[in-house]
Image (cartoon, rainbow, N blue to C red):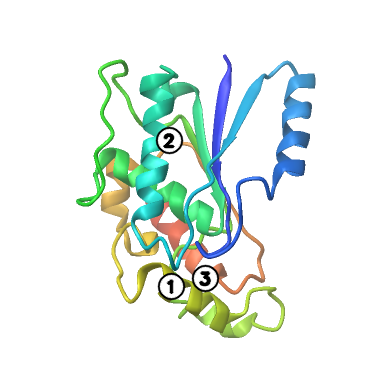
Amino acid sequence: MFVRLIVFAGGGYNIGYARQAFPQFFDLYKKLETASLPISIISLEYSLAPAAKYPAQLKEASAAYSHLINTLNISPNNIIVGGDSAGANLALQLIRHISKPHPKVNPIISSNHKTLQPSKCVLVSPWAAPGHNCPSVAKYQDVDILVKRVGDRWARNWKGSHVDEFTDPVVVSPQEWKEYLVLPTLIISGDKEMLYDDIKLLCDNMKEVCV
């Protein structure tokens, strides 16, 4: 099976670019090739705020995914979706959109595939609640490289004060996750991140699907 990994870079939707993690992805590519596990890695160069407001990035991610499964006829069973920080937020937006389309984004449809969800999801330090109000923000502000006022500005530039299940996946209930959570989903986080409590809540809500 030839796997396609589509990844979204982090940067609070304000900075970052598709090639920023190229050395790590190339290292992963070489290791998998050595293990006879061929893979291709696609990194989307999505538009940035403040010029591109929510849900502009989801529109682009949706178009990219649709291109893979429709134009290139790649089976969703051979696709892994992932990202870090804001990129992980975008990955979760895409996964929700596939099953529960965003009202302002064209739905993903396909006559070639019965199942549209990707086979797996990998999230690194997902930006689960851009409001930055959880206790770990204050607790680890002197440890984490993230600066709250910068993160707050990035969030305002991207979505203003708007909050919904796409922008803030931490508000999605365990009951709703049952409708579209990709299994398996791997979430990686440091234990002294400012966003740790939000990430843990996201994990706890997802875990209830597996109980």
**Farthest-out residue, front:** 51
Residue position marked by numbered label 3 in the rendering? 197
138 up-or-down from 199: above or below: below
Does the residue at mark 1 contact the one at mark 2 (Cβ under 8 Å)? no
Instruction: Give residue 95's mark.
Output: none
Q: Nearer the viewer, residue 46 or 195?
A: 46
Q: CA distance from mark 1 to mark 2?
A: 24 Å
Which of label 3 and label 2 is nearer to you?
2
66 up-or-down from 21: above or below: above
Q: Secondary structure at mark 1?
A: helix
| Badge 3 or badge 2: first in the primary sequence | 2
User: Residue, x 25% and y 29% (percent of image)?
Assistant: 109
Name which residue type carries label 1: Asn
| Residue 122 in view, yes or no | no
Q: Nearer the viewer, residue 90 or 43?
A: 43
Quarter-wise, where is residue 196 in the image? Answer: bottom right
Residue position marked by numbered label 1 in the rendering? 157
| Residue 6 in view, yes or no | yes
Image coordinates of residue 40 in percent, x first then y, are 62, 26
| Badge 1 or badge 2: first in the primary sequence | 2
| Badge 3 or badge 1: first in the primary sequence | 1
Q: Nearer the viewer, residue 208 or 63?
A: 63
Residue position marked by numbered label 2 in the rendering? 64
143 up-or-down from 82: above or below: below
Image coordinates of residue 48 in percent, x first then y, are 49, 59
User: Residue, x 26% and y 51% (percent of image)?
Assistant: 176
Residue count near mark 3 (Cα–Cα under 10 Å), binned few <14, some 14–19, many ≥20:
many
